[in-house]
Image (cartoon, helix red, strand yellow):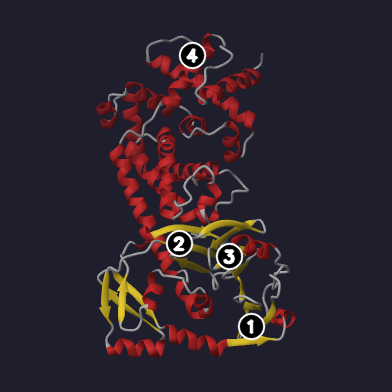
Amino acid sequence: MNEYKEAELFNQSLDEIMEGKTPSKPGDYVDQQLFQLAAMLKGSDFSRDNIAQARMRHKLLNRCREKDFRNYEKESIMKRFFEHHRTVTVFGSLALIFMLTLTLVFPGTVTAVADNVGYNIAKMLKLGKYSAVVQVKDTTPAEKKELTEEQKEQMRKEGSITIKTENGEVKVSNPDYAEQKKDENIVNYASIEEAQKIASFKIQAPACLPAGYELKEVEGYKGSGDYINLYFKGNGKDIIVFERIMNENTQFTYATNGEVQEVRVNGTTAAWEPGIGLMWEKDGVSFDLICKGFSQDEAIKMANSFK
Amino acid sequence: MEKDLAVYLRPELYMDKKTVTDTEIFAQIFDRFYKRIYNYIRYRIDSPEEAEDLSSQVFEQVLRKYDTYRPEKAPFEVWLFAIAHNAVTDYHRKRKHSLWLSLDKVKELISGRPTPEEACLGEENRHELCLALAKLGDRERNIIAMRFAANLKNREIASLLGISESNVGIIVYRSLRQLREILSTREGNHERV
């Protein structure tokens, strides 16, 4: 038997040893010694210093938590609110994390969330490269502060301010400012075809709608082909679809204290929030299907019919 | 996190769907792979303290580089141990510039004197193993580390190193025979293989 054949047979036995089994072929005396050596190697654990391991774990996880916090802070919860306030308005029960919490208690009171916000995240679903849904636990306000008149004036003029609290800096935004800005920037189109001329992605609409519903409005934003909103009206509440191409500029994290469930839409992960709607990302485009009053099955049926 | 590791590692690490923050996912990765990473590195370098530092560096890189992981290209473990492999390679490259330290270590190894930690632990087998591993060639030592400390399969090692699976198999076979001979010699047993 040549060495290659010997090695092949030996490695078959080695696989068994590595799986914790006894080699099915006992081999000769030399093989048995090698098996013993292999078993010794497999069982050798140098990582006995549990204190060092625990120290390293603690250090790395702290770094990770800081990163979590920074990501959630910077990933445009603010952007979503400012640039697409209508989304937030429609997500009426949408509540509230970080700055958004602060926004809704404006004016007059600032609520600073605890510094380790990451601990309050119950669930996170990544819908794609640039979008995510975060379910947060209800948090008890850690601190309340009154805005000064000067700060209120700044909020009116600039839309937001940064305030130092005992838990670090927090941003507070003015929803009225966002609403005002939004209205100035809205563009209405006569049809999807017309909107498609300026859209930077393929606009999709549900082929399957509840009886009585039809497209009533198509809107976008001045100077941008990255966002398109579709409004369908019928016997019940409006069905609204927010579409946007996904990139570093349009990325967002949607935060809610409502229950978030993971479902599948068109072969991809989607987030279902009961009583609100579905959100998913497909082929670099984000879709929010707002369908209050419809069941999950009805929503998924609509979502699967997008084309 | 642009790429959710939980998705890539599912179902192995995605047992509890509530556990989806980056921190919690990373904690699971750390708990699951720390020993294998540390042992892999410890197999390849002689200092426990430096092995600890390198292990920390590997996990820091995992934190930084997860965006580059592509599940369609390789299993997560292969990706992870490629980082560890590169970290050790860099370590050895840098050590060449501080040869005095390396020589000191070699003298220590030749003398057979255990490091303080090893002496304290009183693990004669592990100490002997360290000495024997130090006498293997770098390639052989790496492959033995991947096979036994990292617990990778020959196929995964082959994929990581860009060589054939049968080539890995024969290197493992020869290296074990060599290790056995070194250990036997150290025990005063001069039986030839």
Q: Residue at x 53, y 85 (%)?
A: A182
Q: Which residue is mark 4?
A: A33
Circle nearer the viewer, 3 or 4 = 3
Residue A287 seen = yes
Rounded to the nearest angstrom, the CA distance separating label 2 from label 4 is 56 Å
Q: Nearer the viewer, residue A52 or A135?
A: A135
Question: In x, y percent, where is residue A161?
Answer: 36, 82
Rounded to the nearest angstrom, the CA distance separating label 1 from label 2 is 29 Å
For marks 4 and 1, the one nearer the N-term is 4
Q: Residue at x 33, y 61 (%)?
A: A116
Helix, strand or loop under label 2: strand
The three-letter code of the residue at mark 2 reads Gln
Circle nearer the viewer, 4 or 1 = 1
Rounded to the nearest angstrom, the CA distance separating label 3 from label 4 is 61 Å
**What is the chain letter for disc 1?**
A
For marks 1 and 2, the one nearer the N-term is 2
Position of residue A222 relative to residue A98, above or below, is below
Q: Which residue is mark 2?
A: A135
**What is the chain letter for disc 4?**
A
Q: Which residue is mark 3?
A: A278
Q: Residue at x 34, y 90 (%)?
A: A153
Q: Which residue is mark 1?
A: A219
Q: Quadrant of residue A290?
A: bottom right
Dot 3 alpha-carbon crowd within 10 angstroms: few under 14, some 14 to 19, many 20 or more:
many
For marks 3 and 1, the one nearer the N-term is 1
Question: In x, y percent, where is residue B132?
Answer: 41, 24
The three-letter code of the residue at mark 1 reads Glu
Q: Nearer the viewer, residue A307 or A26?
A: A307
Rounded to the nearest angstrom, the CA distance separating label 2 from label 3 is 14 Å
Dot 1 alpha-carbon crowd within 10 angstroms: few under 14, some 14 to 19, many 20 or more:
some
